[in-house]
């Protein structure tokens, strides 16, 4: 539905919407901001007194009036025809900060919340005339008498790193030519400006460009004609991307840019992500960004904000009571980011000023049949006044007289003729406007930096604050806002909630690559830290190029058409192959690194192959990982090594696959370990057992450390694994009992599995969970349902169901119950209207000592929507509980924070779906909480009281009219894993239904989420060894002590491995990023005795490592380019490491610290 489609096959997208703008600065990273916060507060107080002089005088008068009343009494009332009006009380400028950081709810004081906007808006979709989603905008004409209109026209070209073409195809056909054109066009006239966002393309161009072109580009950046906005590797999605990956992709682009051209971006430009998360605003603020621009928000929300001139605001985090997270935001008001929808409210007129749409050009003509005409002396007056009328109408939607007009679209400015058509015609219009004083306007080409700097200067001179407005001390004159901008709708009832789930297979691969990269970075840092000779640097530094490639492949997939699942099939394949290649490279490095860390590999070079390989392997980019099977002859053993990427010692039940049951498990001291053996299942009704076996045993692995275990056959006087007992329920299939298990038939319609904390009751006819019984006697109804939506209007972006989801399971499926001392399981292959069934699933409980794992319910769903019979269907799992949540629930934003969600009757079902990157929970008035943790991004809703449903996969035959030109039918077989937790509060708390603030997970819930999203990395020896050769005990434990349970290591890495040996001795070479999690203190404070300490007390970074000395530690921005902690919004305590090494990190905060590591 693009208005300016490119006829060469890679056309402009989805109605011409673009990405986000981030201006930069070439000042040094340590430069101070223009005004510090204290000075701004003094200005704000001064402005407040002057602008409210009359009000202050009136208050003094009222004070004396009350003294008189108290002295002489109240006079008799006089009747009046006028009714009194309620007066809005002025909220305090500075909210009171709670002393208890880990109170149940952290909240900020703001003027607007997105929750309040949703409550207020009626969602009637009234036709507004030329501006269909707004109203007929008018102005009086005297608005610019005292302050003329200052117009900044910002040329841009939105370049998707993959969408309808791959990133390489786009580069060769379009992006490289666009960058060439920018350099040539801007060099011709110093009045011309441009902005550029994606470093993935700029890095490619920089490698290919001549020295002369590179010098010209850098000169244009330095003189302010060309601004790098955002400067991330891509313009990332904000619904599905995890905050770890967002930090990675931003840092990868920003650091490359700074090292290559010497500039640091400070303005963000995000015109194309499909909805916006406050997590992005927070991360940008902590990277030193000052301003943001966003575009794709719900059209009714845009209208409501525009009506009150609130399209520019200060975005504040929901937990921030001190205004340290404030960042200025400009929201574009209209439907799209293309030229017809950016000059003003009337697209038919604006399109006439897109001079690239001339007849015979690459782009389609204006749909309104009024084409652009070249500007000349005869028509310049009429054309300029027509355009200025649009500028004025757009201006009255905002508070200031500084106006931003984007001028671009997808892959624009592809050749010099197009660029000249735009620049020359607009310059003639500007010349006329600027030379006609009666117009009270000034128009020029500009960058985002030009716009935001001028706007802030105007806001310094003129107070635009409304009476009683909280605002911000950061920039005066604008409202403060908290909340997120999901779910996006661009018109009518077209909600973009489908992309939360599209291509879920690759959403899962994305997270696997994330956690594997994070673990490999840790290992590389732990290899280099104790190294003092060049010999031991060979392995880690030899891997640096592949490590950089892995970072960039992860960064590329965060693009808003990558992780979203909204690209063409062959583009998805390209993303998949890149991620798969990096996963293989990372696994090879990790296999060698564990040998060095355990003292097995002594040459420390990269030449010899490793003795180990990952316990799970993928045969190709779109295949499910397969467990490597251990096959032991008698008298041999195989080593299994576990790496724990978490900050606490990990005790849990582990599993590997064996071909034989006559095996035993031993720890690194060659001590026998109790184990359990059970058959492996597969998604095949005719052959449900694979013939292989799962062996479970309890392991303990130190924080950030390694531990070795052995699987042996014979020669050890150990007890054999305990075979699980099997129970079958099947009316249609007779199952053979696999050896050596004892099997029986289920003798009831109800089955039960249990551990020491809870029992699960199942309906075996359908193989579905019914209820959970706690050992204290309390019960929770949890009716599991598997259902499908029929969706004739859905596509890659949109979810448009035709009615409600219908259950697909029937009586008569196959159910197998596994009972053992360490793991109990119910496997179900349900009967459905399709053969084979599109789904099978397992529910597990774990036992074996005091571990976090025992408190969760593990749900694993195997999904195969692989045939045409599933076209236009979307598969969900729904949990129907007895929790009275009033259709209110909480879902996470990017794995960093929670957002309160509420289902509204006034918007359609698809508008009540929200992103769920890793967690959703609902809570009843009695404190009962039902949480679902996921290890990949999906979509979630609570459509009825006590219900929580999660979409697992979707297969859509049709295109949904947003420019992709195809449906989504390239589904892959995949597994979705949830960890479910039921909790009761242990102390009284706020009623979650009446509280509008987001709630936080409990400490136990945080721990469960950490274990699911950062699982143990297991490696198995490639060859068995004879039992006569018993190596010494092998383990690795780098931390002096486990970290507090609420302190998470986001990243521990060497940021510049390619320059590791060249860095200055004064420049720290290592990086630690921490996230202090906030947890709900009304739930068990010790995570059921699994946590010994939390970060209420300062954490000492100097004493963190065993055998390694930490030095030169200092706080940094998350992109490593700033060290001015005041500018970053850090409070004094958390921004200063000091001589003692004490870190004070407030809850919710993410903090980066550069440091040097050397052997003690």
Image (tube, rainbow, N blue to C red):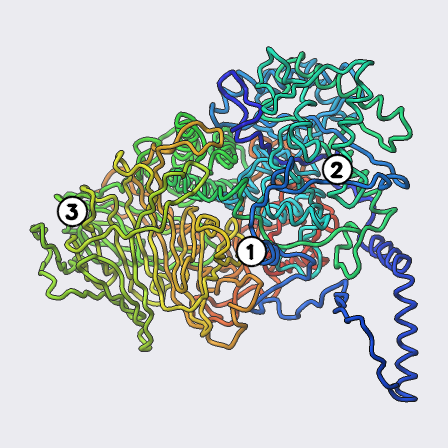
Vertical placement of residue 879 versus 218, above or below = below
Note whether residue 538 is visible. Answer: no
Q: Which residue is mark 2?
A: 393
Q: Quadrant of residue 454?
A: top right
- On residue 872, the disc is none
Vertical placement of residue 387 versus 379, above or below = below
Q: Which residue is mark 3?
A: 688
Q: Quadrant of residue 231?
A: top right
Vertical placement of residue 687 versus 73, above or below = above
Q: Residues within 10 Å of mark 1 (few under 14, many from 20)?
A: some
Residue 219's x, y, as percent? Answer: 75, 21
Task: Please report whichever mark, 3 or 2, sits nearer to the chain's N-terminal start.
Answer: 2
- Left/right of residue 1072 with respect to residue 510 in the rendered view: right
Q: Residue at x 47, y 69 (%)?
A: 1086
Foreground of the two, 710 or 822: 822
Note whether residue 798 is visible. Answer: yes
Q: What element does badge 1 sit on?
A: loop
């Amino acid at each position: 539905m693009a208005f300016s489609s490119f006829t060469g096959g890679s056309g402009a997208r989805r109605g011409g919407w673009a990405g986000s703008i981030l201006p930069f600065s070439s000042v040094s990273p340590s430069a101070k901001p223009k005004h510090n916060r204290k000075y701004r507060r003094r200005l704000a107080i001064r402005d407040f007194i002057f602008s409210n002089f009359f009000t202050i005088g009136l208050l003094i008068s009222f004070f004396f009036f009350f003294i008189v009343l108290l002295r002489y009494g109240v006079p008799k009332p006089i009747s009046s025809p006028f009714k009194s009006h309620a007066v809005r009380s002025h909220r305090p400028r500075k909210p009171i900060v709670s002393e208890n950081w880990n109170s149940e709810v952290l909240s900020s004081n703001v003027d607007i919340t997105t929750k309040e906007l949703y409550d207020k808006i009626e969602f009637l979709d009234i036709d507004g005339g030329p501006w269909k989603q707004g109203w007929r905008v008018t102005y009086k004409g005297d608005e610019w008498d005292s302050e003329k209109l200052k117009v900044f026209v910002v040329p841009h070209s939105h370049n998707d790193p993959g969408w309808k073409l791959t990133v390489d195809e786009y580069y060769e056909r379009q992006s490289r030519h666009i960058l060439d054109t920018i350099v040539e066009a801007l060099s011709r006239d110093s009045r011309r400006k441009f902005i550029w966002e994606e470093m993935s393309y700029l890095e490619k161009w920089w490698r290919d460009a001549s020295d002369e072109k590179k010098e010209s580009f850098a000169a244009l950046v330095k003189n302010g004609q060309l601004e790098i906005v955002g400067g991330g590797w891509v313009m990332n999605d904000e619904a599905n991307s995890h905050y770890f990956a967002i930090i990675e992709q931003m840092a990868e682009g920003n650091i490359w840019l700074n090292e290559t051209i010497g500039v640091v971006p400070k303005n963000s430009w995000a015109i194309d992500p499909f909805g916006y998360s406050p997590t992005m605003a927070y991360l940008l603020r902590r990277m030193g960004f000052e301003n943001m621009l966003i575009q794709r928000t719900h059209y009714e929300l845009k209208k409501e904000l525009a009506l009150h001139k609130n399209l520019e605001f200060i975005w504040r985090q929901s937990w921030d009571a001190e205004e340290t997270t404030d960042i200025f935001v400009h929201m574009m008001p209209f439907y799209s980011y293309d030229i017809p929808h950016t000059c003003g409210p009337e697209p038919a007129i604006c399109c006439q000023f897109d001079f690239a749409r001339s007849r015979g050009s690459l782009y389609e003509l204006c749909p309104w049949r009024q084409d652009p005409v070249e500007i000349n002396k005869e028509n310049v007056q009429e054309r300029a006044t027509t355009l200025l009328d649009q500028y004025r109408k757009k201006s009255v939607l905002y508070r200031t007289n500084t106006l931003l007009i984007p001028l671009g679209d997808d892959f624009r400015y592809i050749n010099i003729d197009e660029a000249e058509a735009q620049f020359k015609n607009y310059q003639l219009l500007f010349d006329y406007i600027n030379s006609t004083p009666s117009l009270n306007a000034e128009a020029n080409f500009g960058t985002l930096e030009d716009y935001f700097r001028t706007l802030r200067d105007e806001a310094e001179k003129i107070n635009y604050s409304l009476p009683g407005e909280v605002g911000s001390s950061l920039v005066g004159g604008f409202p403060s806002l908290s909340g997120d901008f999901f779910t996006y709708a661009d018109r009518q009832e077209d909600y973009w909630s489908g992309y939360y789930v599209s291509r879920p297979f690759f959403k899962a691969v994305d997270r696997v690559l994330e956690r594997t990269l994070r673990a490999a970075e840790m290992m590389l840092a732990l290899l280099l830290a104790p190294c003092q000779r060049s010999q031991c640097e060979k392995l880690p530094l030899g891997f640096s190029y592949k490590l950089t490639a892995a970072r960039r492949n992860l960064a590329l997939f965060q693009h808003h058409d990558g992780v979203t699942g909204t690209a063409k099939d062959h583009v998805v394949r390209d993303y998949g192959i890149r991620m798969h290649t990096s996963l293989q490279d990372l696994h090879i490095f990790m296999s060698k690194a564990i040998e060095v860390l355990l003292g097995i590999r002594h040459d420390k070079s990269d030449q010899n192959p490793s003795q180990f390989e990952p316990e799970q392997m993928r045969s190709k980019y779109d295949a499910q990982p397969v467990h490597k099977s251990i096959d032991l002859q008698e008298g041999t053993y195989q080593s299994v090594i576990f790496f724990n990427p978490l900050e606490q010692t990990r005790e849990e039940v582990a599993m590997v696959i064996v071909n034989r049951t006559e095996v035993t498990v031993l720890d690194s001291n060659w001590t026998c370990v109790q184990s359990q053996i059970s058959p492996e299942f597969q998604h095949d009704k005719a052959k449900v057992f694979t013939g292989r076996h799962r062996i479970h045993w309890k392991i303990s692995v130190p924080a950030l450390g390694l531990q070795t275990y052995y699987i042996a056959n014979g020669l050890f006087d150990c007890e054999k694994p305990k075979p699980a007992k099997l129970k079958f329920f099947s009316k249609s299939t007779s199952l053979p009992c696999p050896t050596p298990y004892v099997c029986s038939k289920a003798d009831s319609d109800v089955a039960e599995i249990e551990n020491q904390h809870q029992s699960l009751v199942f309906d075996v006819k359908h193989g579905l969970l019914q209820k959970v019984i706690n050992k204290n006697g309390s019960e929770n109804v949890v009716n599991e349902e598997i259902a499908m939506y029929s969706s004739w209007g859905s596509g890659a972006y949109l979810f448009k169901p035709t009615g409600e989801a219908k259950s697909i399971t029937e009586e008569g499926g196959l159910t197998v119950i596994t009972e053992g001392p360490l793991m109990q399981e119910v496997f179900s292959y349900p009967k459905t209207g399709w053969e084979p069934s599109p789904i099978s699933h397992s529910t597990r409980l774990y036992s074996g000592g005091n571990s976090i794992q025992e408190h969760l319910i593990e749900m694993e769903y195997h999904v195969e929507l692989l045939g045409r019979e599933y076209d236009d269907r979307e598969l969900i799992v729904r949990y129907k509980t007895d929790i009275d949540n009033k259709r209110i629930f909480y879902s996470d934003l990017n794995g960093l924070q929670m957002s309160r969600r509420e289902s509204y009757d006034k918007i359609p079902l698809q508008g009540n779906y929200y992103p769920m990157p890793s967690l959703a929970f609902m809570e009843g008035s009695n404190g009962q909480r039902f949480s679902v943790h996921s290890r990949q991004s999906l979509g979630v809703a609570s459509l009825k009281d006590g219900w929580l449903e999660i979409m697992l996969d979707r297969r859509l035959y049709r295109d949904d009219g947003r420019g992709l030109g195809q449906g989504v039918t390239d589904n892959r077989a995949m597994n979705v894993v949830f960890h479910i937790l039921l909790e009761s509060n242990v102390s009284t708390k706020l009623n979650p239904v009446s509280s509008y603030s987001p709630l936080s997970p409990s400490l136990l819930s945080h721990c469960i989420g950490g274990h699911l999203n950062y699982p143990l990395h297991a490696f198995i020896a490639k060859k068995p060894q004879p039992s006569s050769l018993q190596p010494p005990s092998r383990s690795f434990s780098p931390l002096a002590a486990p970290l507090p349970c609420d302190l998470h290591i986001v990243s521990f890495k060497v940021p510049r491995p390619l320059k590791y040996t060249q860095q200055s001795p004064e420049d720290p070479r290592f990086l630690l990023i921490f996230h202090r999690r906030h947890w709900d203190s009304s739930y068990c404070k010790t995570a059921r005795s699994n946590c010994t300490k939390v970060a209420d007390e300062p954490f000492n970074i100097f004493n963190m490592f065993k055998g390694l000395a930490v030095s030169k530690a200092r706080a940094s921005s998350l992109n490593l380019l700033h060290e001015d902690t005041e500018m970053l919004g850090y409070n004094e305590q958390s921004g200063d490491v000091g001589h003692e090494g004490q870190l004070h990190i407030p809850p919710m905060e993410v903090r980066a610290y550069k440091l040097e590591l050397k052997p003690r």
